[in-house]
Image: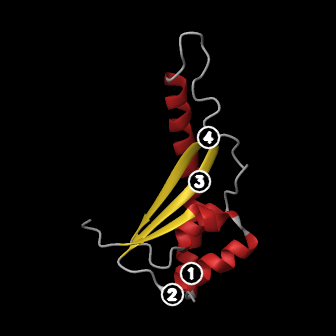
Amino acid sequence: PVDVKEVAESTEFYLRSGKRLIGAARRVLQNNAAKCKNSNGNSKTSKIKNTITIQDLCSGHGLTGLLFLACNPPGRFSDTRIRAVLVDQFEPKSHAILRDCISEICPWVAESVSFYSSGLEK
């Protein structure tokens, strides 16, 4: 459903930036949690699971966002969950096909991705 060029571009983007982006987001979440410590030194957020949201605008088929989810399964980071929000003017048929194919191997993807059809001006 997606041509080789699109697959190569999405894969390259994830491989070059995925670890760096998620690492930076986790550091921000950890710094925020440290600021929320109460006077006893106990963290109020110790049992709260953090969420990193990948927002893929002009996502087309959404493969880039799906790769972020597939390569970061639940449990990889004990305190953090990852979800993806994909936005484009319309949802192409290839998105549902890709999501279903990837979800067969990585079942957590289906519950962690949302596709919104909308113009960017909204």
Q: Residues within 10 Å of mark 4 (few under 14, many from 20)?
A: few
- Frontmost residue, 69 versus 110: 110
Q: Earlier in the sequence, mark 2 or mark 4?
A: 4
Residue bearing mark 3:
82
Numbered badge on residue 49: 4
Q: Amino acid at mark 1?
A: Ala
- Which residue shows up at 59% across the image and 10% down it? 40
- Which residue shows up at 54% across the image and 29% down it? 33
Circles 2 and 3, Cβ within 8 Å, touching? The answer is no
Q: Amino acid at mark 3?
A: Ile
Residue bearing mark 1:
96
Q: Amino acid at mark 2?
A: Lys
Q: Residues within 10 Å of mark 1 (few under 14, many from 20)?
A: some
Q: CA distance from mark 1 to mark 4?
A: 28 Å
- Which residue shows up at 44% across the image and 80% down it? 91
Circles 2 and 1, Cβ within 8 Å, touching? The answer is yes
Question: Where is residue 60 drawn, in percent x and y?
Answer: 44, 78
Question: Where is residue 59 drawn, in percent x and y?
Answer: 44, 73
- Frontmost residue, 25 versus 85: 85
Q: Earlier in the sequence, mark 3 or mark 4?
A: 4
Q: CA distance from mark 2 to mark 3?
A: 24 Å
Q: Amino acid at mark 4?
A: Lys
Q: CA distance from mark 3 to mark 4?
A: 10 Å
Check the image and tell me how it is coloured.
secondary structure
- Which residue shows up at 62% across the image and 49% down it? 81
Label 3: which secondary element:
strand
Query: Where on the picture, by quarter, is residue 121?
Result: bottom left
Q: CA distance from mark 2 to mark 4?
A: 33 Å
Q: Residues within 10 Å of mark 3 (few under 14, many from 20)?
A: many
Label 4: which secondary element:
loop
Q: Residue furthest top?
A: 40
Numbered badge on residue 93: 2
